[in-house]
Amino acid sequence: MLLEGIETLLVLQKERTMSRTGSFLYVSQSTVSKRIANLEKKIGKKLIEPDGRYIRLTADAVALVETIEPTFRELCGQIYESQALEHHTLIRLDCSETLVAGLISEALADCVQQDRYITTNHTPRIVENVKSGRAAIGISAGYLPPHHGLLAFHVVDEPFFIVSRQPLQALPDVLITNDLSNNANTYQAAILDRLNICPVMEIDSYTAAAQLALKGAAPALTPLSIVKALQISADNYFMFDELRPLFRPIHISVRQNNYRQPRIKAIIENMMAAIAETNADN
């Protein structure tokens, strides 16, 4: 009961609503409320308070999260590792949505069979899920957070292009970008600043950014995955030498002990080979 309450509080901190927290945990909104209420009763402190349409953690709750989150994630991971991985056990791969849509779609089609399933998330959440055992394997785009504590394999660097409705002869002054506050994307801001490019809009979707660019709103910084997924015409995406330092490192991550399991190791090796082959063809 206590572990359920702590897990619920950790998710609520990020999702900020009871309904989204319930969706993430696959429980009802009323179950989320009961878990938080039980946790408050257990520790004798108020943990949440309303914040408009959202919920925010109290100062006591924030202090509690900062203290227990690393230990809780590690404990969940160790519990997961202690479970026997039978030949029929479902194996969850948590992946970057853009990679699933484009760069690794063929590789996943070849490697994912009946005993595996896929979820999609941003890189920070992928790392959390692998650390806690919610996912056995993570496939992420962008830089991993420091001190992540996972076994990470750098597979390939995915290039960026500029998608534009109009032909481009030089780098534009403004770009639609992805959310630069995302820890996996913050490195992009410094590079764009050196190139004197202003992020005119930051959208939490490369697909939406590319679609806006094709409609003429402004050019958009777009990874190869989205160029492939949207089948963007060669007349509408451009590469410049100045952009070559700007790329997304693709990593496959796993808990150290999990990599010793033959099924996990085989999936990772097959995925790495398939992604490398796909990249060589582009």
Image (spheres, rainbow, N blue to C red):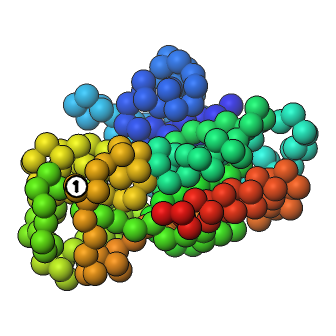
Left or right, 205 with reference to 153: left
Front one among 233 and 155: 233
Q: Where in the figure is residue 268, as x and y percent of width and height?
A: 73, 58
x, y percentage for residue 272? Answer: 67, 62
Total residue callouts:
1
Left or right side of 175 for 54: right
Residue drawn at the location 12% of the way across and 78% of the way down: 196
Q: Amino acid at mark 1?
A: Asn
Please give left or right for residue 196 compared with residue 30 in the image.
left
- In what quadrant of the picture does the N terminus appear? top right
Q: Is residue 173 visible?
A: yes
Q: Can residue 198 be seen in this snapshot?
A: no
For the point 59% across and 35% down, the residue is 5
- Residue 225 pos. (x, y %): 43, 54
Q: Is residue 92 above or below residue 206?
A: above
Please give the residue where the numbered disc 1 appears in the rendered image: 236
Give the structural element (helix, strand or loop) at label 1.
helix
Query: Dot 1: few (<14), some (14–19), or many (≥20) neighbours within 10 Å?
Result: some
Most foreground residue, 40 or 210:
210
Q: Residue at x 30, y 32 (%)?
A: 54
Q: Which image quadrant for residue 89?
A: top right
- Which residue is pictured at 8% across the width and 70% down the height? 173
In x, y percent, where is residue 193? Answer: 18, 77
Q: Taking 27 as reference, is 25 above or below it?
A: below
